[in-house]
Amino acid sequence: MVQHVEQNLQLMTKRAVKAENSATKLKQENALLQVQLNNYKTENEALRSGQLASLAVVKRNADMALQNLLTVLTTSRSSIKQLVSGAESLQLVADLLKSIDRISEVSEDGQ
């Protein structure tokens, strides 16, 4: 039983690490998209001040930024759900390990 719990703990730890890595990757991608968004905002301001002639370029860039942000948002939600699930599983394993300790203490008292 302890071996089974240890295997579950290892599996949950791997899932949590994978989810954390995904979250880190998504944070980096989000930071890159934020930079792109700021660049698009700057370009938009330049268009408004008359430095660029085409409003279509701004619209295309804004649409692209929006699509990128929506993609990151969707992927982030999935990774966060996985991370929360892994954390809940680890909590369950921790609770099981605590229960094993209690059972062991009761057995020792009963001898």
Image: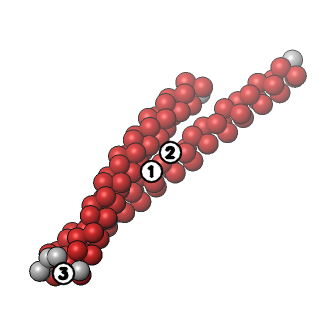
Query: Hey, which quadrant is residue 96 in on the image?
Result: top right
- Residue positioned 26% across, 64% down in the render: 39
Q: Quadrant of residue 42?
A: bottom left
Q: Are marks 2 and 3 in contact (CB under 8 Å)?
A: no
Q: How many marks?
A: 3
At 18% from the left and 81% from the top, the residue drawn is 50
User: Can residue 71 be seen here?
Assistant: no
Q: CA distance from mark 2 to mark 3?
A: 52 Å
Q: Is residue 82 above or below residue 96?
A: below
Whether residue 18 is visible: yes
Kind of residue at disc 2: Gly
Residue at image mark 2? 86
Label 3 residue SS: loop
* SS category of the residue bearing label 1: helix
Q: Position of residue 40 (x, y in %)?
A: 25, 68
Residue receiving disc 3: 50
Amino acid at pointer 3: Gly
User: Which residue in the protein does label 1 denote?
Assistant: 82
Q: Is residue 104 above or below residue 89?
A: above
Which quadrant of the figure has residue 104?
Answer: top right
- Residue 64 vs 7, above or below: the answer is below
Marks 2 and 1, how far apart in space?
Answer: 6 Å
Image point 87% across, 17% down: which residue? 111
Q: CA distance from mark 1 to mark 3?
A: 47 Å
Badge 2 marks a residue whose secondary structure is: helix
Q: Residues within 10 Å of mark 3 (few under 14, many from 20)?
A: few
Label at residue 64: none
